[in-house]
Structure formats: structure tokens, C-alpha cells
């Protein structure tokens, strides 16, 4: 009969949970001191825990949300739509040019393949005609 180790396993799991929570709270304090953005992913990475565990801790998730709401957001710099639009147009033109180039290459290769096939057919026909009289003679 095997010994019942469930109490030991339960104690070990509780210790791991407490250690993970302690590391997470320390990492949270560090991120706050650094005035860094606090996200679930960033906090999990800093604490050395997995994100899925973080989501099982509703108080920590709520704290992260509160920190995010309390922090003043820096305004995003205005993005020039003209420059990004011009960039997209240039990329589109380059893509169209490349498509034309590939289409021309493809057409040329198809012609070469058709020519090679017709030459091969002609060679086979010639070879079979030259072999036929020899076969008839035997």
C-alpha cells in the first residue's frame, strides 16, 4: 500500500503559490518605483510566473487595471497620414512592378518549356522512325 502524500503535496503547492505571489508583489513594487507600464504580461515576466496564473489572482489583475487607469497617458505623436499613405503607395507600386516582372518571367519560361517539349517529341519521333526499319528487318 502506498503512503498518502496528499498533505505534503498540498503544502508544497501552497508554498509555491505563496512564493509566486511574493515575487509578483515585489515585481509590482519595483515596476511602480520605476514608473514603468504595468501590464499582466510585463508583471508576469518580471516576477517569473506565467500569465495564466496571474489571471487566477483577481486582486492583482484589478490592481494592474487601477494602475493603468491612474497613470497619465502620454499623447501619441500625430502620425502624418500623407507620409504613411505615400509609403503604402510606393510599396504597392513596387509590388505591381514585381508582379509584372514575374508574369513576364513566367511567360518566357512557359514558352521555353513548350519549345523543349516539341523538340523532345520531334527527337522521339525521329528515333522511332529510325528504329522501325531495323526492327522490320529482323
Image (tube, rainbow, N blue to C red):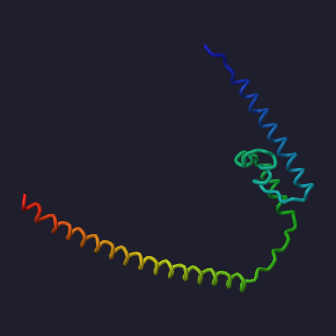
Residue 39, image x, y percentages: 79, 56
Of 120 and 108, nearer the camera is: 120
Of 35 and 103, nearer the camera is: 103
Tell me: 100 left or right of 10.
left
Q: Residue furthest right?
A: 33
Tell me: 3 left or right of 112.
right
Q: Residue furthest top?
A: 1
Q: Quadrant of the C terminus?
A: bottom left
Q: Quadrant of the N terminus?
A: top right
Tell me: 123 left or right of 112.
left
Residue 40, image x, y percentages: 76, 54
Query: 137 above or below 77?
Result: above
Residue 49, image x, y percentages: 76, 44
Q: At 33% from the left edge and 76% from the top edge, which residue is drawn?
A: 115
Q: At 59% from the left edge and 84% from the top edge, which residue is drawn?
A: 93
Number of disc labels: 0
Query: 107 above or below 4?
Result: below
Q: At 11% from the left edge and 62% from the top edge, which residue is drawn?
A: 134
Query: 12 above or below 56?
Result: above
Q: At 84% from the left edge and 74% from the top edge, which residue is drawn?
A: 75
Question: Which quadrant of the structure image shows residue 120?
Answer: bottom left
Residue 8, image x, y percentages: 73, 24
Amino acid at each position: 500500500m502506498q503512503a498518502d502524500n496528499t498533505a505534503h503535496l498540498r503544502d508544497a503547492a501552497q508554498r509555491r503559490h505563496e512564493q509566486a505571489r511574493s515575487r509578483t508583489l515585489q515585481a509590482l513594487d519595483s515596476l511602480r518605483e520605476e514608473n514603468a507600464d504595468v501590464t499582466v504580461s510585463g508583471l508576469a515576466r518580471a516576477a517569473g510566473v506565467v500569465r495564466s496564473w496571474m489571471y487566477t489572482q483577481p486582486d492583482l489583475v484589478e490592481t494592474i487595471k487601477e494602475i493603468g487607469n491612474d497613470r497619465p497617458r502620454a499623447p501619441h505623436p500625430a502620425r502624418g497620414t500623407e507620409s504613411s499613405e505615400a509609403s503604402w503607395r510606393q510599396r504597392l507600386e513596387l509590388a505591381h512592378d514585381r508582379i509584372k516582372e514575374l508574369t513576364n518571367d513566367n511567360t518566357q519560361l512557359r514558352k521555353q518549356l513548350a519549345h523543349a517539349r516539341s523538340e523532345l517529341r520531334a527527337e522521339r519521333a525521329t528515333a522511332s522512325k529510325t528504329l522501325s526499319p531495323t526492327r522490320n528487318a529482323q
